[in-house]
Amino acid sequence: MATTTATVSITSSDLVPGMPVSINASSTLYQTGTTTGLELVEMGRGTLTQASGADALADALGTADTTNWVYICNKSTNVEQYMIIGIHETKIGHLGSEEWLWMPWNMGDSDAEINIEAEASGSIDYEYAIYRSTNTLPAKT
Amino acid sequence: MATTNATITINSDIMSYSGNVSTTMEMKKFGSTAGIEETTGLQVKKFNDTAAVKIVDNTEGTAGKGSKVYIRNTGSSSTHFFYVALNASAAASDTAQTIGKLYGGDWMLIPWIATAATTHDIHVAPSTTSTMTLEYMVFQE
């Protein structure tokens, strides 16, 4: 059984005056509702262009309403370049330059794809990793 | 200007070669090198009902900017979880606004667009009437 852990550390000495922020958390990634580790992963790096509009980083291929995890990092160092992250028609947020996200993705239905879009100009390099409970390969054409 | 850093580390042996991730970001304002300067502080809430509950109102961030949201299920259950969604549909598994599920120990850190509408309130829905606890913090712009 594979073991995957995700750890976060959030620190700030001056966000809250007189009260340093220090959050540390770690989780082990399990298959849906079990203590069996996730065993499917897709990792990669790509380039988005503003002109291409929104693209699906990952389709919801697999069993709906399961445990899956998404990591995305905007590798641009230009603060004017950001990524719009969404699930299908729902925009979640703006991922600024050199920022990352970590979120669960339950693939609620077959339309619940992860969308990414580059703004405001030029091209943006990004990295991603998707850890899944299930995955169905696209049908042969 | 405040400085808030967040580091994610993902260690995994799913693949036979290294697929580990370690990245640090500074939480910046949208399109700026300036750090985020406002926060709700870390909040802790207990739940013992399966009804969806709003934990973050859209007005707690400025629409279209660079807010971030950290959420963690502080429990240890591998069978009980919270749905997290961008509106009151959190109780359902298959709506477009549902992001995913947080089992015991799971955490997430996402950008949040804070669109000025109830569609971008953040809701959670426990899967059980047994007591579960969530901690969450909004890094606001």
Image (spheres, coloured by chain):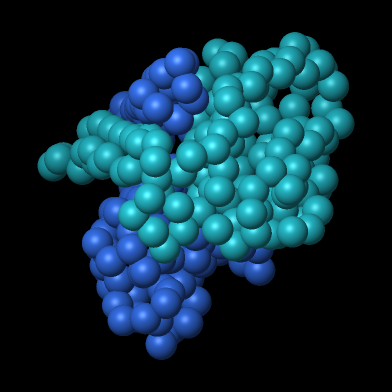
Chain colours: A blue, B cyan
Identity of the residue drawn at 83% across and 27% down = B50
Q: Where is residue B15 in the image (x, y as percent from the top left)?
A: 22, 41
Q: Can residue A35 be seen in this view?
A: no
The image position of residue A91, as x and y in percent, is 61, 62
Left or right of B43, for residue A43: left
Instruction: Quadrant for residue B95, please give it.
Output: bottom right
Check the image and name the residue furthest to the bottom: A51
> Where does the N terminus of chain A fall, quadrant-wise?
top left
- x and y, in percent, of residue B17 in the image: 13, 42
Residue A77 visible from this viewpoint: yes
Say left or right for B89 vs A133.
right
- Of all residues, the one furthest to the left in this rendering is B17
Residue at image location 66% in from the left, 68% down from the top: A89
> Horizontally, is A4 left or right of A58 in the view?
left
Which residue is at 64% across, 54% downward?
Answer: B62
**Image location (x, y in percent) of residue B26:** 33, 43
- Viewport quadrant of the C terminus of chain A: bottom left
Total numbered circles: 0
Viewer-side residue, B13 vs B75 = B75
Of A4 and B35, the residue lying toward us: B35
Q: Residue at the spot x=65%, y=27% of the render?
A: B81
Q: In this view, does A43 lie above or below B47?
A: below
B45 or A31: which is nearer to us? B45
Q: Looking at the rendering, which quadrant does residue B21 occupy?
A: top left
Vertical placement of residue A49 versus A103, above or below:
below
